[in-house]
Amino acid sequence: MRQILAATVAMLAIVTAAGAADSVATEAGSATYNWSGFYAGVLLGYGTGDSSAISDNGFDGSAPEDRADLSPKGFAGGAVAGYNWQRDQLVFGVESEVGYLGAKDDFWFPDGDDYFARSEYGLYGSLAGRLGFAIDRTLITARAGVIVADIDYGYGDIDGGVNGEPDPDSSIFGDGARAGFTIGASIEHAFAGDWVGRLDYAYSDFGSHIETDGFDETYDVSDNLHMIRIGLIKKF
């Protein structure tokens, strides 16, 4: 995560410097860039997050501190489309996104304890409102909205040791769409006509929900994900 943050800071510095150069050019008499209108493009990068299950009496007593923690990570990318309105340097709009998340993690029989955990993301879609500040050909934005993602998970006890199978009575499983909120920020720069490069960060939180195993023991399951991506956008 520290490497991701360091790379983000470096890229932000580069794009901000480009924006400052454009600002100087504007003062010298060049036309101010217009961000209004429809746009579409792709975002590609990496996601990493936290998934966990906590149960006071679950896992058949196998999990230390009665919890299992995972760190799903992997590819994050999709197609994005939206519309901007601009008033002076203020830009606001709406943006939709659909794509695929390859973030996943699992373990089986950790440190000799007979329990397991797994979490795997899949397809997702989001819709968000955006608010930004334009410095000629550079645009800095923040956004907030809703996201729905497919999350496949399982937590519980193992029967028969390391080569055993999940105990169906002391385990929970889920596979389906989970809804949550998403927030993010981006820096965009129009580098060639209506072609725009973007550096984008997003955080998505799918909250927590309660699942019950065959012994009526409850598990508090939660998921969240950070994404850092670069994108290529075309304005129309």
Image (cartoon, helix red, strand yellow):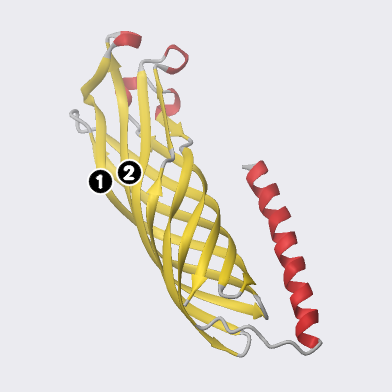
Nearer the observer, 34 or 115: 34
The correct choice, above or below, for 112 with respect to 8 in the image is above
The correct choice, above or below, for 203 with respect to 119 in the image is below
Residue at position x 30%, y 32% from top? Answer: 154
Mark 1 nearby-residue class (10 Å; few <14, some 14–19, many ≥20): few
**Where does label 1 land, which residue?**
176
Q: Quadrant of the N terminus?
A: top right
Residue 114: name its quadrant: top left
Q: Position of residue 194 (x, y in %)?
A: 56, 75
The answer to whether marks 1 and 2 mark residues whose Cβ atoms lie closer than 8 Å is: yes
Q: Amino acid at mark 2?
A: Ile
In the image as oriented, which residue stretches furthest toward the front? 193
Disc with the residue nearer the chain's start (1 vs 2): 2
Marking on residue 151: 2
Q: Position of residue 196 (x, y in %)?
A: 58, 68
Q: Is residue 234 left or right of residue 52?
A: right
The correct choice, above or below, for 125 with respect to 93 in the image is above
Marking on residue 15: none
Residue at position x 36%, y 48% from top? Answer: 208
Residue at position x 41%, y 46% from top? Answer: 101
Could you tell me which secondary element the residue under label 1 belongs to? strand
Mark 2 nearby-residue class (10 Å; few <14, some 14–19, many ≥20): many
Count of numbered labels shown in the rendering: 2
Q: Amino acid at mark 1?
A: Gly
Q: Position of residue 168 (x, y in %)?
A: 20, 24
The correct choice, above or below, for 192 with respect to 124 in the image is below
